[in-house]
Image (cartoon, coloured by chain):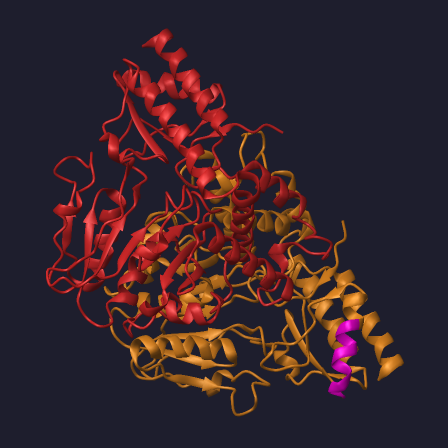
Chain colours: A orange, B red
Amino acid sequence: MTRHYNFCAGPAALPEAVLVRARDELLDYRGRGLSVMEMSHRSPEYVAIAEQAERDLRELLAIPDNYRVLFTQGGATLQFAAVPYNLLGLGGQANFLHTGIWGKKAIAEARHLFGDAPVAASSEAGGHAAVPRQSDIALTEDAAYLHYTANETIGGLEFDYIPEAVRPDGRQIPLVCDMSSSILSGPLDVSRFGVIYAGAQKNIGPAGLVVVIVREDLLDRARADMPSLLGYRALAEAGSMVNTPATYSWYLAGLVFQWLKDDIGGLAAMDAINNRKAEKLYAAIDGSELYSNPIARRNRSRMNIPFVLADDRLDKPFLEGAEAAGLLNLKGHRSVGGMRASLYNAVPEAAVDALIEFMGDFERRKG
Amino acid sequence: MTRHYNFCAGPAALPEAVLVRARDELLDYRGRGLSVMEMSHRSPEYVAIAEQAERDLRELLAIPDNYRVLFTQGGATLQFAAVPYNLLGLGGQANFLHTGIWGKKAIAEARHLFGDAPVAASSEAGGHAAVPRQSDIALTEDAAYLHYTANETIGGLEFDYIPEAVRPDGRQIPLVCDMSSSILSGPLDVSRFGVIYAGAQKNIGPAGLVVVIVREDLLDRARADMPSLLGYRALAEAGSMVNTPATYSWYLAGLVFQWLKDDIGGLAAMDAINNRKAEKLYAAIDGSELYSNPIARRNRSRMNIPFVLADDRLDKPFLEGAEAAGLLNLKGHRSVGGMRASLYNAVPEAAVDALIEFMGDFERRKG
């Protein structure tokens, strides 16, 4: 068996310890005589797995008791629809911070369904090199909530603060965050948010699962005209089992949560590791003549680090050399080109060290 | 490692050969140095897996070229919404055959979203003991399509024919089928259908994946007001990758398709095995004094076989004895009680033999 270093932006690397445990339990879950994949979602053994996963996530993020945790399907993309369906039932408009491709997709879906979705602040004019400041954010009079993307996976742009969502009339409205590519990368004050959602395939588990954390008082603002499966109230009341959930993905997410607790030591420890990994890669980029990253220092993502080579004719040999060295999936998103190293939780520090060494070698040989 | 016999109605047993292969490839997919779970859905290796799965499914079901195959999320339950969104854009109403709990849920969702959903025929008055005959089906003048549930997982009721969907004006309209619990149980004439959909967690793979087979000319009847991710046209054009699909479940479905082709020998062979399994269990039920099944012979499900004990005080010792004998998940659905043995493709004939032997022993000892 060979395990290479995987810098994929998602579906992304999973902790090897998690995969080993999944493998060992795959045909027979702890002497039960069947795979977790083969368990009824309503069986006592599966319900125990599901509830343990939720408890561990609550402990990791210190989720307050007045928040519900949902394990559902359709990725962040289906939440782009589910959020306005669930929060616009009392009227008003969704307001957005636009900081890149994922924020733009969330805006497009809200407009597709509900006609308008005002942008309260945007970093588009500056090429999404820095996020808007708090003082740039101007909500509409009828803003029902403010949506933003904590970390732009493609642009490599991350908020360095949690925005305040205050309307011109001074009223605070719910803050909604797409946290797909940065959730669990460090401690978080969940109480600042109305809704947090995250596709699993970066820091949580395999693709096909999305986690929603929603404040209880927001469960009763839903429009009547949405597909029933998108309703937060129904999902919360059914323990996310309105229908058969993505049981195996949920189980794997639970293994990741246990790994974060037991092997890593919690999110403060994860935070320190993530800081170290990102800092050394940015230092290598900044210290070179060949590589560069365009993002303002205060908003550089710790999870997704895009960089370009000074001469794009070197892109192909760079990627070929990296792959030959066991450094996989460094190609940048097709919409921006160049390179991107995603350093999610499961990417070990040794992977970053190996990447930096390869980059240095490559620069000396070719740059 | 112990593997018991698993009669769960879903998530259900998977072929042991599939689980063994998944286990062996879990940390390192064929020397690539990473798990399938960790692959970008857009990487050449993953796209090859996804395309192979579709090719194998097309071969198994002899799907005509003018049908598209979608691998999406949210289970059959989200399709209860997606189907009317996709097919009612030109007006008209969804018509339904009501044969049990799953059909009723599909009707409820169409009514929830669109106000009315006429029932063209129902088996409710007879306690869903037999499906309506073709001559009982009366479509409305404005019927846009006819929806039915090929096999009612809870009631154990299966259509023994494919209905014709003809309006009073003589016009044929698309036939839509929820085939979640019987797809791939035998050969099928796909050309009779407009849309077939099936949650994966019975005969396809793990929960969290749903397969949709849709005739190409139906891709342009969608309403404008649906969540983008539910649109068949967009999914078809993107190769089901509008967003990140449930990659690992899709891969496992592909392994199941390969098992059906290579280990079983195709759907005609599977059909014969399924006939044998079901016939011997029904014969054991019918030949006993203790067990009974209420469904008309022509509509007895091959996949889900509910039965009751003449004295329901014996239910508990029956289930305890079965579990002790390694026969798992025989308890009937909570809405109907009694027992249910689901004999999906992955349940081996030996499991049915063991169940019949246990039932006979139990009757002699307790009945």
Say which quarter of the image contains residue B353.
top left
Instruction: Identify which residue is drawn at 25% across, 33% down.
Output: B298
Instruction: Identify which residue is drawn at 39% across, 53% down.
Output: B75
Is residue B162 or residue B203 the one in the foreground?
B162
In the rendered structure, which segment of residues is drawn in magenta?
A311-320
Query: Considering the image in quadrants, where does the C terminus of chain B appear?
Result: top left
Residue A312, placed above or below residue B198: below
Is residue B16 or residue B226 the one in the foreground?
B16
On the image, the x and y values in percent for residue B348 come to: 49, 30
Query: Considering the image in quadrants, where does the N terminus of chain B appear?
Result: top right
Is residue B251 or residue A250 the one in the foreground?
B251
A99 lies left or right of B314: right
Instruction: Identify which residue is drawn at 49% across, 39% down.
Output: A38
Q: Is residue A43 visible?
A: no
Q: Which residue is at the far bottom?
A: A125
B44 lies left or right of B296: right
- All told, the count of numbered labels is 0
Q: Which residue is at the far right?
A: A365
On the image, the x and y values in percent for residue B45 come to: 64, 62
Say which quarter of the image contains residue B328.
top left
On the image, the x and y values in percent for residue B63 come to: 42, 57
Residue A287, placed above or below residue B49: below
Q: Main secondary structure of the magenta part?
A: helix
Say which quarter of the image contains residue B124.
top left
Residue A152, placed above or below residue B95: below
Q: Is residue B121 magenta?
A: no
On the image, the x and y values in percent for residue A57 come to: 52, 52
Residue B137, placed above or below residue A29: below
